[in-house]
Structures are given as structure tokens and as C-alpha cells.
């Protein structure tokens, strides 16, 4: 079975193989596994530049808050070292950003990446620039692109893991009810079925992770707007996931909800993310969903992950569920898991 990719919009839609071969190698390379935890980034940049405006511009990218969480959580855990300190231990870090400032070598700022340079499952993002000001401006202009690239790299790692370990309960429900294939984290084993609906959960008091899947008729382009999607979500959740007592049911906090079009498996989809709460109860947390059209049945199929984790950080939990949303394969999508990778243009290069 091959691996599934995480598509990206526009020029980010086509993917490359995840393995780059080192030029000049005549023997098979045996690399260690990359070190570090998910969403950790190592920045290789001298201390003076790191603490100057140019370095602060890069820090601001990595320190950006994850959207639509109930509390502030930075996108990445950041470690910075001097170039001279890049030893064997640091060189196998999972995510490395290496910055080179040299006007004698570079006429313009450019960015490129290499996979598996020193370790398996590693990404090294290199930014070359002729000056500190050019580098600072590049970070400002490409903030979202760098952020999206690193985030999707981590999600692709998760998706690759789901090939080997996934919830059979969730997979079977998706197939039985919707004739879809779907790979969710293996811990999601508790479940509930409804009419064109199912819910699975890890059913733990510490960091409750949940997946819901439901469908409704596609009624044209007006189906994909915030108000319509929110109303549908609220009606489905109220009917299928009531609270412990009468009058308690899940609702969407519409003031903290964002929607945007995305591309999944080269087809249009709508992403919705925000906060949910339990009416007449103290429960709540973040959610993220993908809405896609099954053209065989002319229905919208929605797959959603939501988290309830009071007193815990939620970035890792919700991103873990979000990554799994990209594994949904609709009935007409006959391919299974295909090569993991990210479009090279997502690390946008300017001629140096």
C-alpha cells in the first residue's frame, strides 16, 4: 500500500516524491531517524542576527498562534543555535531552517528545501539572502507560505503513519455508511451510529479526540458558505450528540468560526474551523472539518475532528485529527494511499 499525500492549493497542488537522492552517491545511504517531536523547529542562525529585526521576522513566523484555539498556542516549538554548533546531534533534527546571509554569493533572496538530508523523515529549509534587510522583507512577504509548508510537512508525517496504524472501527463505519475510505488515529475505538452519521472517539478523560462523519444533499454553490454549513453542523450535532441532561447539545460558536476553500485530492473542498460548546453545560473546544461533494450521490460528505481537553494544550490534538481528514477517499476516488510529498513550489524559490 502506498502513502497518501496532503494536497495544497493552487501551485501547491502537484506533489513531488518525498525522497531526494544525494548527488554523487554510489552506495546506499543508511540514515538514522530524524530526532525531535512534532512541530519542533531548529533554526541555524547566529545570535546577533537572531536577535536583530531580521531574525525577529523569522521568529514571528514560527511563533504565530494556531488559529481557532480557545487559548494562545504557538505554531512551533523553536530552538535556535549558532552555525558553529550544528553538530551531529543537531544535524538530524526533524525540521531545520538554515539561513545564509552573504552578498558575495546571493543577489536575491531565495528559499529551497531538501528531504532526508542527514536523517530519514527530515526536512531542511534553506534561505539564502544577500542582506539582512532583504531577508527580513522576505520573511514578512512569505510568512504564510513558510508557515503552511512546515505545518503540512508535519501533517504528511502523520498521514504516512496512518498507513500502518489506523482505527479499524472508524474505517469500517466510513465504508459501511458512506462507501468511503478513511484513516483516523487508531485510538478512536468508541463509536455511535446514526442516520447518515457516525462518531468515534478515544473515550478518555484526558484529551478527548473525536471524529464525526455525516452527509446531506448538495443544493448548489450556496451549500458552501459559513451560515449554511454552520446551520447544518448544529442540526446534525444536536440530533446525534446530546449532552448528559435534557436541553444540553453541541453548538458552533459562529463568532469564532472560519471557512475557506481548499483542494483535497485535486478537487474542491471547504474547510471550516472554529470553536464548539455544549449548550447549558461547561464543555467546549476546537474543531476542524472538510466538506466535499460525492458526485455519485449528489451529497455533501463532511468529516470533522473535534477535541475536548480542559487544562491541556490542544494544538497537537487538533492537528492530529486535521491531518487525518485528508485521508478521506470518496466513492469515486478509486486510488488508495499514494506517495507522501509536498509540491516543491511550496518552498518558493527566487532566482539567486
Image: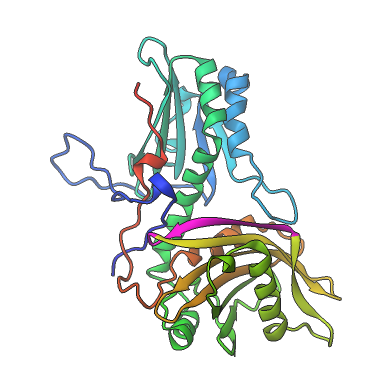
Residue in view at x 64 percent, y 49 percent: 66
Residue in view at x 74 percent, y 75 percent: 250
Task: Say whether residue 207 is visible.
Answer: no
Q: Is residue 12 magenta?
A: no
Q: Is residue 257 magenta?
A: yes
Q: Is residue 212 left or right of residue 36?
A: right
Compared with residue 152, is residue 288 higher up or lower down, i.e. above or below?
below
Which region shows up in magenta? 255-266
Task: Please count the marks in the image.
Answer: 0
Please, which colouring scheme is shown? Answer: rainbow
Task: Say whether residue 219 is visible.
Answer: yes
Image quadrant where residue 344 sits: top left
Compared with residue 344, is residue 174 higher up or lower down, i.e. above or below?
below
As drawn, the residue found furthest toward the top would be: 104
What x and y, as percent, mark residue 94? 44, 45
Q: Is residue 185 left or right of residue 331?
A: right
What x and y, as percent, mark residue 279? 82, 75
- 171 or 246: nearer the viewer: 246
Q: Which corner quadrant holds the N terminus?
A: bottom left
Q: Which corner quadrant holds the C terminus?
A: top left
Q: Is residue 334 left or right of residue 95?
A: left
- 223 or 172: nearer the viewer: 223
Instruction: Name the dominant secondary structure of the magenta segment.
Output: strand
What x and y, as percent, mark residue 266? 38, 59
Amino acid at each position: 500500500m502506498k502513502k497518501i499525500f496532503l494536497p495544497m492549493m493552487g501551485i501547491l497542488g502537484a506533489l513531488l516524491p518525498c525522497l531526494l537522492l544525494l548527488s554523487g552517491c554510489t552506495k546506499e545511504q543508511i540514515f538514522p531517524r530524524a530526532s525531535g517531536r512534532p512541530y519542533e523547529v531548529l533554526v541555524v542562525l547566529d545570535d546577533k542576527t537572531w536577535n536583530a529585526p531580521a531574525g525577529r521576522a523569522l521568529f514571528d513566523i514560527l511563533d504565530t498562534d494556531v488559529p481557532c484555539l480557545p487559548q494562545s498556542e504557538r505554531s512551533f516549538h523553536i530552538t535556535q543555535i549558532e552555525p558553529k554548533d550544528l553538530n551531529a546531534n543537531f544535524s538530524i533534527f526533524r525540521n531545520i531552517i538554515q539561513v545564509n546571509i552573504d552578498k558575495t554569493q546571493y543577489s536575491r533572496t531565495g528559499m529551497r528545501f531538501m528531504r532526508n538530508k542527514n536523517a530519514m523523515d527530515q526536512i531542511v529549509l534553506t534561505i539564502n539572502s544577500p542582506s539582512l534587510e532583504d531577508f527580513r522583507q522576505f520573511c514578512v512577504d512569505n510568512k504564510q507560505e513558510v508557515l503552511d509548508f512546515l505545518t503540512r510537512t508535519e501533517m504528511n508525517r502523520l498521514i504516512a503513519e496512518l498507513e500502518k496504524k489506523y482505527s479499524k472501527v472508524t474505517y469500517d463505519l466510513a465504508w459501511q455508511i458512506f462507501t468511503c475510505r478513511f484513516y483516523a488515529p487508531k485510538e478512536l475505538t468508541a463509536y455511535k451510529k446514526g442516520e447518515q452519521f457516525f462518531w468515534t472517539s478515544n473515550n478518555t478523560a484526558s484529551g478527548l479526540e473525536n471524529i464525526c462523519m455525516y452527509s446531506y444533499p448538495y443544493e448548489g454553490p450556496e451549500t458552501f458558505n459559513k451560515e449554511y454549513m454552520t446551520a447544518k453542523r448544529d442540526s446534525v450535532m444536536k440530533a446525534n450528540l446530546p449532552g448528559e441532561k435534557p436541553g444540553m447539545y453541541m453548538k458552533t460558536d459562529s463568532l469564532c468560526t472560519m471557512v475557506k476553500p481548499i483542494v483535497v485530492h485535486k478537487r474542491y473542498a471547504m474547510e471550516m474551523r472554529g470553536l464548539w460548546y455544549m449548550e447549558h453545560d461547561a464543555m467546549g473546544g476546537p474543531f476542524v472539518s472538510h466538506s466535499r461533494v460525492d458526485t455519485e450521490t449528489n451529497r455533501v460528505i463532511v468529516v470533522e475532528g473535534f477535541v475536548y481537553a480542559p487544562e491541556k494544550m490542544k494544538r497537537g490534538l487538533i492537528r492530529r485529527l486535521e491531518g487525518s481528514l485528508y485521508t478521506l477517499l470518496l466513492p469515486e476516488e478509486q486510488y488508495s494511499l499514494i506517495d507522501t510529498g509536498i509540491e516543491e513550489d511550496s518552498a518558493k524559490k527566487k532566482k539567486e
